[in-house]
Image (cartoon, rainbow, N blue to C red):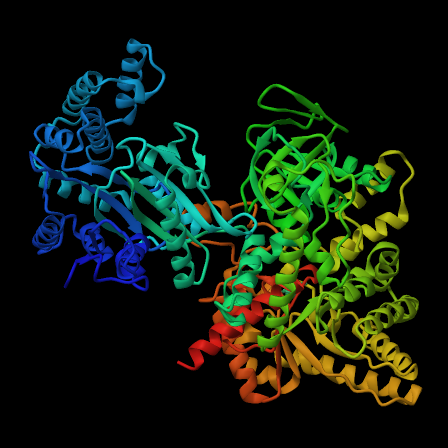
Amino acid sequence: MQYVFDFTEGSKDQRDLLGGKGANLAEMTSLGLPVPPGFTISTEACRSYLATGREPDGLADEIERHLSGLESGMGKRLGDATDPLLVSVRSGAKFSMPGMMDTVLNVGLTDLSVAGLAAVAGDQRFAWDSYRRLVQMFGKTVLGVDGERFDHALETRKKDRGVDSDVDLTVDDLRDLVAEFKEIVRGESGTNFPQDPRTQLDLAVRAVFESWNTDRARIYRRQERIPDDLGTAVNIVAMVFGNLGPDSGTGVAFTRDPATGEQGVYGDYLPNAQGEDVVAGIRNTLALAELERLDKASYDQLLDIMETLEKHYLDLCDIEFTIERGKLWMLQTRVGKRTAAAAFRIAGQLVDEGLIDEDEALSRVTGAQLAQLMFPQFDPAASRTSIARGMAASPGAAVGKAAFDSATAVEWAQRGDDVILVRRETNPDDLRGMVASRGVLTSRGGKTSHAAVVARGMGRTCVVGVEALRVDPRARAFTTPDGARVTEGDVISIDGGTGEVFLGALPVVPSAVVDALYGRAAAPPSASSGPESEAEAEGESSDVVRREVVSAVLRLMRHADVRRRMEVRANADTGEDARRARDLGAAGIGLCRTEHMFLGARRKIVEHVILARTPEQRDAGLDELRPLQRADFTEILEAMDGQPVTIRLLDPPLHEFLPDLTDLSVRVAVGEATGSPDAEAAALLAEVQRLHEQNPMLGMRGVRLGLVVPGLFELQVRAIAEAAASLLARGLDPQPQIMVPLVAAVQELEAIRDMAEATVAEVAAETGTALRFPIGTMIELPRAAMTAHAIAEAAEFFSFGTNDLTQTTWGFSRDDVEATFFPAYLERGIFGVSPFESIDADGVGRLVSIAAWEGKETRQDLELGVCGEHGGDPDSIHFFESIKLDYVSCSPFRVPVARLEAGRAALVTEGSDSR
Ligand code: PEP
Ligand code: MG
């Protein structure tokens, strides 16, 4: 087993073994770029250390061999008294974890070698300042001394000297500080600061290994979903110094603008400074362009190198560099992070430049990025100062009057006001208020709180957990951290992409990407669109950015459509939604829920049907509903003409159509108490009590309803058939599919199928039209999945209802758990993401794949789709592609995201199929 690799040995494809930083340092070395020499201790060594609590056998010898090589290459020995080699010891995991793990610079400085460094550099101050930094960093990260102790000593010294900046301390000050720091180390850790350079090195390496498991690193990994068992590599690099005077310095740079994707070189430079000074913000940095004036040769070389890196990595790179007395050194590079807009734009640019093909470009953007671009935003040109910040729970930019309860929100929205619902936390009673509001703001709760989950589900902008705001629902007000009071009716703005809260109305601009996806031209910039931001004044206008982003999105969407194997349909229940979905690229409706058609004014009629005492009463109710249903279906089928429309027969528990038990009880009790009993209410109450269920979700719903309430499903099938017949007569091409919900046994489906076929045949005969519609079922119960062989005998299609399938497989009530114990489950890592949001591939997903496979065995042309929430979730879409479903169906607004991800997923499976 080899644990240590010289920079001349590795490559960028070895991030698993060498970590991101090590792999890229090796890559730059083999490209012949000026990288200080060094070597990498592998993640394998770290994993072994973390498992056993000691360095693996042979590691010390390997480090010795590589260190000797480094020493002879540099012509210096580590910590030598006359001309010391110094090294940095840097962490570097496979995935970047900025600032989460440890780094120690200037390793090799001792009481002896500090003099040698001073002599060689010709600079006493520089040498003692470097030594001071080492004792401080080593004490803190390796020996666990509280960093405050050093900071305090440094501050006291500056105060005593009457200076503001470290730079103004003299050599004597620094020498005294080193002595003082060493005392702090001895007092706090019980050991002396080690004077043997190799001991310093070994202890620093061990500290980096151990920093993998600090609390902050663990929390970061959980958030970013980085596996816990990867470990970090450790890079030992010969030190180069940017703090050797005005001809030295250090900087960071990007090969394109990571915010907008604009081509050109971006970065910051800090003369006479060491790496950590740039991030620490001690002094103001210069724009990179200034370097051209300060050191033209290094600047030109840097630009050349950046071009080489882009051509080599075929992507935006970010880099860190140091200039030591006019000589440029590359300390790091990696493919850089970028905003959603920049991701699309850069992918498009790289195709134009012939550097990558469209497949590669598609693989570099994500559905989550597209979703970000589809929400309205606060005008980037407007100035803004937030009053508080919470968690960004559901994207978008919302402005409205603060309302502190649901009833007020609904009332104001009805009179035409924009409202932001402000609560400590929301509960299901707030649903109406949330629907009526532009946005939702809570002071408590996390990303899976009720507010967050529900708001995301309905595409409402939402910010949760803004703990700094004191919300007082009784006083109908909240207080900001600086004491300002916002009362009911005051206008506020919330940014669901950043979690920020603002006073007053910020200007909102619609998403140009959505306009373009709908085929609408983006609005021309208005002449009065306010002053441009400073950044824009220097660079290109936001209009150029917008145009280029939009054209890149459209181009990659086209390519995704070419590539994808799965179709994308929409979940839509109205003609308007159907049209919207179609405009956004849906190829049909995968789920038309019919329950909404029985609410509102029609609820009364449904109530009569359910509570009917005689067949005549029931039929009268059904006859009243039929023309209304027919009109509903006609509108939807017309809007989706020529495309499949999967209409699901009535599904929800009965109680949803009946008056509320508590309300009725109160009415009856009040009637009795006031001596005027309400006979009708009493009769109704008796019926409602009779039909009351403890677990309605597991009760009288779905196909059970159809089998028990005579005539109900028949009414719906007849309405579908009549709607189709009338459209055919008008020369259109309606394509309804009839779907039966909550089937667990094939016998249930057979009974409904017999009825439906007979009804369709009747309508065909009555209207003289040839009618035949596919009849299929939802697969949303484990028993249905496990008996898919049999069920496929009676079904022409399966549509996986992964919402109910998740609920019933886990035994999780979908209406309750996300607000109760999910936060604890997420915290404990039982799952990384809610299984209602992203498919649980191992459990629920396995049922889907077994059912799909067995269904196809029975019926080769069985159509397979998914219509649960997961149909619009990127990770889930990749799973459905891997088990070869025919389509996913999701809410209209998520259709573009699903198209993009289905295309990306097809690329991945194509790649693995051909391997
Ligand atoms: C499902 O259960 O996944 C589904 C789509 O149906 P609903 O959400 O209406 O129960
Ligand atoms: Mg369902």
Identified at 20% across, 33% down, the residue is 138
Would residue 529 be found to the left or right of residue 914 on screen? right
Along the viewing direction, whichever of 110 and 58 lies nearer the viewer: 110
Give how far across and how far down residue 889 sits, in percent.
65, 68
Vertical relation: 67 (above or below) 109: below
Identified at 75% across, 28% down, the residue is 490
Identified at 70% across, 32% down, the residue is 492
Vertical relation: 235 (above or below) 637: above
- Which quadrant of the figure contains the C terminus? bottom left
Q: Quadrant of ligand 1?
A: bottom right
Identified at 28% across, 33% down, the residue is 243
Q: Is residue 836 visible in the rendered structure shown here?
A: no
What is the count of numbered marks? 0
Along the viewing direction, whichever of 77 and 820 lies nearer the viewer: 77
Would residue 178 be found to the left or right of residue 781 on screen? left
- Which quadrant of the figure contains the N terminus? bottom left
Give how far across and how far down residue 226 sits, in percent.
38, 53
Give how far across and how far down residue 111 sits, in percent.
10, 27
Vertical relation: 257 (above or below) 843: above
Would residue 641 be found to the left or right of residue 470 on screen? right
Along the viewing direction, whichever of 422 and 187 lies nearer the viewer: 187
Q: Quadrant of residue 658?
A: bottom right
Give how far across and how far down residue 833 sits, in percent.
49, 54
Q: Quadrant of residue 321?
A: top left
Q: Is residue 460 visible in the rendered structure shown here?
A: yes
Q: Quadrant of residue 581?
A: bottom right
